[in-house]
Amino acid sequence: MYRYDDFDRAFLEERVAQFRDQVARRLAGDLNEDEFKPLRLMNGLYLQLHAYMLRIAIPYGTLSSLQMRRLAEVAQRWDRGYGHFTTRQNIQLNWIRLEDAPDIIAALAEVDMHGIQTSGNCIRNVTADQYAGVAADEIEDPRIWAEILRQWSTNHPEFSFLPRKFKIAVTGAELDRAAIRVHDIGLRMCRAPDGSTGFEVVVGGGLGRTPLIGKTIRDFLPKDDLLGYLEAVMRVYNALGRRDNLYKARVKILVHDIGAERMAAMVDEEFQAIQAEGGVALDPVLVARIQDHFAPPAYAPAPEGPPEVLALERADPAFARWRATNTAAHREPGYVIVNLSLKPHGRPPGDATSGEMRAVADMADRWSLGEIRVAHEQNLVLPHVRQADLPDLWRAAAAIGFATPNIGHLTDIIACPGMDYCALATARSIPIAERLADRFKNLDRLHDIGPFRINISGCINACGHHHVGHVGLLGVDKNGEEFYQITLGGSAEEDTAIGRIVGPAVSSADVVDAIERLVETYVDIREAGETFLETCRRVGNAPFKESIYAAA
Amino acid sequence: MPLLRQGRAVADIWTHVEGEGELPTDDVAVTVDAARWSADRDRLIARSGPLGVRLANNDPVDLLAEDLGQLALIVLHFPKFSDGRAYSQARRLRRLGFAGELRATGNVLQDQLLLMTRVGFDGFVMAAPDAERRYEAALAAYDHFYQPRRIVAA
Ligand code: HEM
Ligand code: SF4
């Protein structure tokens, strides 16, 4: 994985010093809150419902055990001993004191971490497929390009005061695990007929108030042109993105208003101008160095399908189920990708305590070459596990409650912090997730239901990705009471779709029952082997609508 | 309000003519807005004194593309510091070859000076009385830049 060099470290030290000075100026009254706000946001520091919240970037979701231990330490020393992993491959600490913030970011900088570009109207922390570099179905490791984008966008002098925040996601595999079509820019690595690799460029996706699926404006962009082309996109957006209305300031609105073809033409014109002025050429030495960082590790030879693991699988159905559900195919024979479920039934999705973070760091050191990934579904991933180590790892994960075999299933719920933490919320998300997880905790039933994704947001901003859940729940406030609007048929994968609203919002008291009736309807009407999403696409919303609003 | 050039507070020699207002004598340095420039371009160029144009941040810079050699000053505006359109305008003007003074006006704050410098601004009108000190502090904050030195070949 990428290791900071002297340059990255020196930059970060300058950043820490600058922020320390800004906080000092704020505390001394030299900066007023209006002036200070964008500066603290540039370092991921929010003012939330109850306290300051610090959002720490985990670029493209890759984390070392050392970094994980530091997160544990920071959460313990300066927060309340836990953190929240988010859909944007960040971790949030919810109870920070402003006075401590400079020391915290100094402690993070020691392990090459920071909160830069986790907030504000800039190019945000670039996200990527959590299986990058190890997935069996991958064309190329997208993290090389995500890292190049991280460097290019860091303190970019032209793109730090955009009309709105700007999110880029990259995937290198056939299956889209990075939700690229609901990002401002989605990049999908692909192959040209001549065998060279490059990017499909998708622009103008996003959720929030106006959910839109991004449009492809370039089928194949050679890798060398990446920065020049993205600079062109950013410049068109900076000039033409609306600034008169917060809700219309995203690039998705621009693309929607002028059309994908016109957008593509304008970007191309700007790109040609940039090329004519000398272009934004990549330094091949630097690219090669970054590529080396992401070279596959030296895997010790490991047997494929070791007999003792197969034996345990036969002997212990719980292990067999966990293996089938929580692991994924690895490109290296004898190895496997392991998902640690951060959705133990009865806990807020995505939360981990300092102790749990340390335990995961230990597991990574023992069984995954010291590397951890954070998935946008709010789970953790150990990317380099020998199949032979699965039994031991499984027991260790179970000991901290991270072995629930629910990845991709109904209780693997994505939920934003909602009203428990967020100043913008209109309803709570976490308690709904917890109640649903409790209702569906029977694992036989969970597995009979099959692949099923419920996403919950506490307001229209859609941090919980509710539009792209197979079932989406959006919390709304009706005269001081919490209600939940239900959408059906969403997806964030290759077949990205925005869910359709079924009908009037359901009360907090009824919502879990309503979902249960909907699930029962699916189980009744599905055809053999059909997932919920497939059934939903075949029959439409009507039968589900009926069940949701059936008198309880 | 202090005007900084090369980090030093200097007097503003320019007369900033509003809208269709009267022009001073021919030898005086004047700036006009984009509309006046378009309307009066030839007469302005015929004057002997230095010329400047003030662009609003939604004026297309292409408006000046043909005239960059005629201009000694282009003033770009930040109605609020969070509106970053003038960064792109500055970058494009420099890339198009503008060699005169690029001046930032409006909400120009210490923590933006470094970024402004890096897209090509070299003049700053700041509200803060201790603008020189702020400029120094802002430029001293970083020695390390990811663009262009780092990832982009020179
Ligand atoms: C707790 C403080 C948070 C605040 C104040 C906040 C604020 C917002 C706002 C205002 C938007 C709407 C942006 C727009 O549509 O232009 C948004 C969108 C979003 N946020 Fe958050 N958020 C918070 C936490 C989170 C968390 C914890 C996550 C991840 C779990 C997250 C991930 C996202 C995502 C994925 C979107 C969708 C953006 C899009 O595609 O348009 N946010 N957030
Ligand atoms: S969706 Fe709304 S409630 Fe949830 S985190 Fe985002 S802004 Fe807060």
Image (cartoon, grey):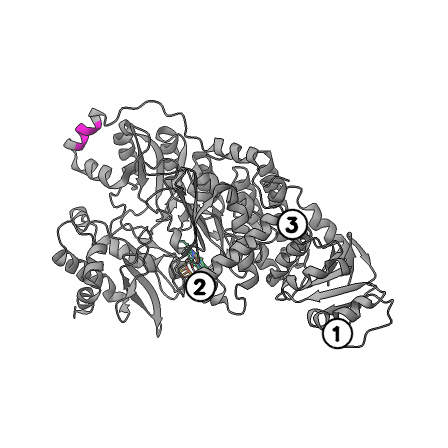
Q: Chain of mark 3?
A: A
Location of the C terminus of chain A by quadrant is bottom left
In the rendered structure, the residue with mark 2 lies on which chain?
Answer: A
Label 3 Cα crowd, 10 Å radius (few <14 / some 14-19 / many 20+): some
Pointer 2: what residue? A259
- Horizontal side, residue A145 vs residue A303: left or right: right
Q: Where residue B151 sits in the image (x, y, percent)? A: 58, 40
CA gap between label 3 and label 1 equals: 39 Å
Q: Magenta segment, which residues?
A: A309-313
In this picture, is A449 found above or below A515? above
Compared with residue B40, is residue A343 higher up or lower down, i.e. above or below? above
Q: Which of pointers 2 and 3 indicates the residue nearer the eye?
A: 2
Give SS at disc 1. Answer: loop
Q: Nearer the viewer, residue A384 or A552?
A: A384
Q: Earlier in the sequence, mark 2 or mark 3?
A: 3
State the mark number for residue B18. 1
Mark 2 residue type = Gly
- Report x, y in % for residue A336: 30, 33
Q: Nearer the viewer, mark 2 or mark 1?
A: 2
Q: Are marks 2 and 1 on the same chain?
A: no
**Image quarter where ligand 2 lies:** bottom left
Res. A240 image quadrant: bottom right
